[in-house]
Image (cartoon, helix red, strand yellow):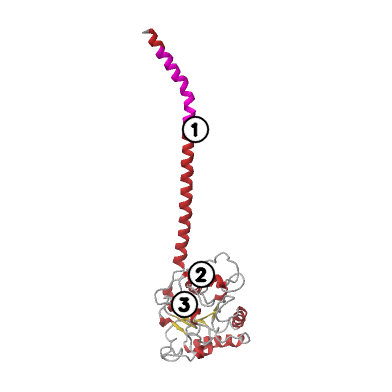
């Protein structure tokens, strides 16, 4: 019995001596496994985070630049021959909405300069505040009801129209002025017209026509508030061969006429310009002239 007891004691001592040798090996193995698990978890987290950020950005952009409702109209350079012979070459041809892929394809070929950081996108307006406002203009203003911002009754606009024509043109049998004129009953009128007819030499004349129309509107509709928007810029390459130098000449001439009869002039042009003075591509339709949904929201925010 004493011998067996001695063997057990020796065996116990042996186990105690071996334990310290095995413990560091197990600890190192466990630490290695833990490090691998942490690294895998970190990689998974980074992968999920990067994808979530991309999706979030896409959702924000898609929401703000949402396509117009079914039936809306936007510029389509592919139908430049669809106007009547009398209107051929005049600014403004509209058709069905182009999807994002086609728009991006055109934008990439029309970009005037490298991409710059996006401008602030104001949405500080209530569209119901414009229910008693009449918008008078050419094809750009047809996008106001085309995109569904306001009813067609709030828009007196026509493709290819000039400032001198706007006084007498009939829309649904009604002219702008008169006892049953389109302008009757509105508390405010916003005018943006003049691109059609500009040839680079007559900017002052066309600006005078626009201002005269605004003055006539004040006389015909006592108490109405009249606002004139400067003409927006265009992309360097556009389907109507328009030049920003011509548009800038018109806007400068228009500004020299301001200050009388309570007519206000709002500088819409500067809100849409890129770093080289052209129409920022985020606001441009494929033809390089007409405007996106976002640009109209900028306009309404400025008018508010």
For marks 1 and 3 on the same chain, the one whose residue lies earlier in the sequence: 1
Residue matched to label 2: 104
Q: Is residue 277 above or below residue 192?
A: above
Is 5 part of what is drawn in magenta?
Answer: no
Q: Position of residue 202 (x, y in %)?
A: 61, 87
Tell me: 247 left or right of 101: right
Could you tell me which secondary element the residue under label 2 belongs to? helix
Q: Position of residue 13 (x, y in %)?
A: 44, 16
Q: CA distance from mark 1 to mark 2?
A: 56 Å
Q: Are marks 1 and 2 in contact (CB under 8 Å)?
A: no
Image point (41%, 12%), residue name: 7
User: Alpha-carbon neighbours of circle 1 within 10 Å: few (<14), some, or many (≥20)?
Assistant: few
Q: Is residue 48 above or below residue 232?
A: above
Label of residue 28 in the image: 1
- Taking the view exactly as shown, the residue that stands out farthest to the left is 1
Q: Position of residue 27 (x, y in %)?
A: 47, 31
Tell me: 245 left or right of 72: right
* Residue mark closest to the camera, 1 vs 3: 1
Image point (53%, 90%), residue name: 164
Image point (44%, 90%), residue name: 170
Q: Main secondary structure of the magenta part?
A: helix
Label of residue 74 in the image: 3
Q: CA distance from mark 1 to mark 3?
A: 68 Å
Could you tell me which secondary element the residue under label 3 belongs to? strand
Is 20 part of what is drawn in magenta?
Answer: yes
User: Alpha-carbon neighbours of circle 2 within 10 Å: few (<14), some, or many (≥20)?
Assistant: some
Name the residue nearer the viewer: 109 or 90.
109
């Amino acid at each position: 019995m004493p011998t067996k007891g001695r063997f057990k004691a020796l065996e116990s001592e042996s186990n105690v001596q071996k334990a310290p040798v095995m413990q560091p090996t197990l600890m190192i193995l466990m630490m290695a496994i833990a490090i691998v698990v942490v690294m895998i978890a970190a990689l998974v987290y980074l992968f999920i985070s990067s994808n979530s950020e991309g999706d979030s950005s896409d959702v924000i952009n898609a929401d703000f630049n949402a396509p117009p409702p079914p039936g809306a109209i936007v510029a389509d350079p592919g139908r430049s021959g669809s106007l009547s012979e009398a209107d051929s070459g005049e600014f403004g041809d509209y058709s069905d909405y182009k999807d994002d892929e086609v728009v991006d394809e055109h934008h990439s070929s029309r970009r005037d300069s490298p991409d710059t950081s996006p401008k602030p996108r104001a949405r500080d307006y209530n569209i119901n505040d414009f229910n008693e406002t009449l918008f008078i203009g050419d094809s750009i203003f047809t996008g106001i009801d085309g995109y569904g911002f306001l009813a067609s009754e709030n828009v007196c606009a026509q493709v290819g129209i000039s400032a001198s024509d706007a006084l007498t043109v009939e829309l649904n049998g009604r002219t702008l002025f008169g006892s049953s004129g389109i302008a009757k009953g509105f508390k405010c009128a916003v005018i943006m017209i003049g691109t059609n007819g500009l040839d680079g030499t007559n900017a002052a004349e066309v600006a005078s026509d626009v201002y005269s129309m605004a003055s006539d509107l004040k006389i015909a509709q006592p108490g109405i508030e009249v606002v004139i928007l400067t003409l927006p810029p265009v992309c360097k390459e556009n389907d109507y061969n328009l030049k920003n130098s011509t548009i800038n000449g018109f806007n400068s001439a228009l500004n020299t006429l301001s200050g009388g009869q309570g007519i206000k002039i709002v500088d819409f042009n500067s809100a849409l310009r890129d770093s080289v003075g052209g129409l920022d591509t985020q606001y441009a339709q494929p033809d390089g002239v007409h405007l996106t949904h976002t640009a109209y929201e900028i306009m309404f925010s400025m008018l508010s």
